[in-house]
């Protein structure tokens, strides 16, 4: 329960399971365990009750880098919430492996790493430099579901 | 041959190997087996003869959600055709692992999950809820090869 | 040192570690080894001194296919440089597994495979058809960090 104790100390909460907009069906696993591999679906920022969280729209146009950084940090919490639901304990993540960060991007926006750092910084703070270490891509996509400003897919190694 | 029998019952066909437009070279493996892992290249919808299939263009502009859902379903068939060519039998897929769904997206389109469900729904119908279970991302990309409206990359576990 | 001898014969150099623009922090591993898997972060073209290399902007608008092909080839060199730094010897790559190629794409551009071939062709030339074989996706993204025209993420198997 070390990681959860750190979350509490930071005053952070894990959101409820995602409540997608009416009529949207999500027929897949948010965290899919295959042996020691934890394959993690694309996650976005959520409110405490599980609803999809803003700010909505394109980073570099409607959404600032600072807002998007916080949305990426919030996305890490959505992901940790599902990891906890699937594994029971966040400490069962032996290490992070891969982070694929997608920014809903205005055509000329070019600071994607500074946005996805909101995700990486929290993971490194919670898991430390060795277990938190991950390979990463940060790119600008044309659009994201529900107009969220950030989506992150990942893989972890499980103890 | 259980999965293939299901395909036949559904009246579905597997297309011929991809015939890209003239002058296009694709110097990579459509399905790349490494031990128990089957790494699957990005696939798109194909006609029975292997040519690239429409509708072409941006979902949310030239292409409707319903058309794109069918293109995603057709993309699953392109992928299954290559899995069969590589493994000999679709039943050798022990389970699905990861699905990465990319929608050629108008800037304001936000229903990507409803499009990629065309892929997931067919996989779940063919392989059932346990073997068909997968982690998934669904995003909007700026453009796709040959102006196809959907592309899906995946990974499976092989028996 | 077989792969490095080939590089030398081709007159190709491996760039210095990336020097991102001022103020940009990249808190992640460029190559992350987990057992036999080498998970490789998104890379772009670099100059010999490690600075981010052009041409910058959208392929299909400011950047031609031929220029982008060379940028994808250059991206392979950036990646090989980091693999060498992490593994000590490029021959320790037993085989290539997955290549995910992202083109900073004008909305109507549709020749992404011809761009990412710059990456694949060099890998196949250096590692041969068996060890160099990889599954691949090639897509068009809305924007990339620092306005680079190509970014490639990958996975290799390590001896």
Image (cartoon, coloured by chain):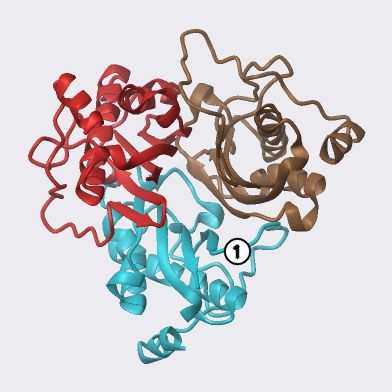
Chain colours: A cyan, B brown, C red
Q: Position of residue A146 (x, y in %)?
A: 56, 56
| Residue B55 drawn above or below residue A7 | above
Q: Residue at 46%, 15% (x, y): give it.
A: B25
The residue at 74%/45% (across/down) is: B123
Instruction: Point out residue A8 in the picture as x, y percentages from the top left corner.
Output: 42, 90
Q: Is residue A14 visible?
A: yes
Q: Residue furthest right?
A: B9
Q: Nearer the viewer, residue A52 or B10?
A: B10
How crowded pointer 1 is (Cα within 10 Å; few <14, some 14-19, many 20+) is rated as many
Which residue is labeled 1 in the image? Answer: A33
Q: Residue at x 15, y 50 (%)?
A: C20
Decide which of C33, A31 is in the foreground and name it. Answer: C33
Where the C terminus of chain C falls, by quadrant? top left
Residue A64 seen in this snapshot? no
**Which residue is at the far top?**
B22
Chain under numbered label 1: A
């Amino acid at each position: 329960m070390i990681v959860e104790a750190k979350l509490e100390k930071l005053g952070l909460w894990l959101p409820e399971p995602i409540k997608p907009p009416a009529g949207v069906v999500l027929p897949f696993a948010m965290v899919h365990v295959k042996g020691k591999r934890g394959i993690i679906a694309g996650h976005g920022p959520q409110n405490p009750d599980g609803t999809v969280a803003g700010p909505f729209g394109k980073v570099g146009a409607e959404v600032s880098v600072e807002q998007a950084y916080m949305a990426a940090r919030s996305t890490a919490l959505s992901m940790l919430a599902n990891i906890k639901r699937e594994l029971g304990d966040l400490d069962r993540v032996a290490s992070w492996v891969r982070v694929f960060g997608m920014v809903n991007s205005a055509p000329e926006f070019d600071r994607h790493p500074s946005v996805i750092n909101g995700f990486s910084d929290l993971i490194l703070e919670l898991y430390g430099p060795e277990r938190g270490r991950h390979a990463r891509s940060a790119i600008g996509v044309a659009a994201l579901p529900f107009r969220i400003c950030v989506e992150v897919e990942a893989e972890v190694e499980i103890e």
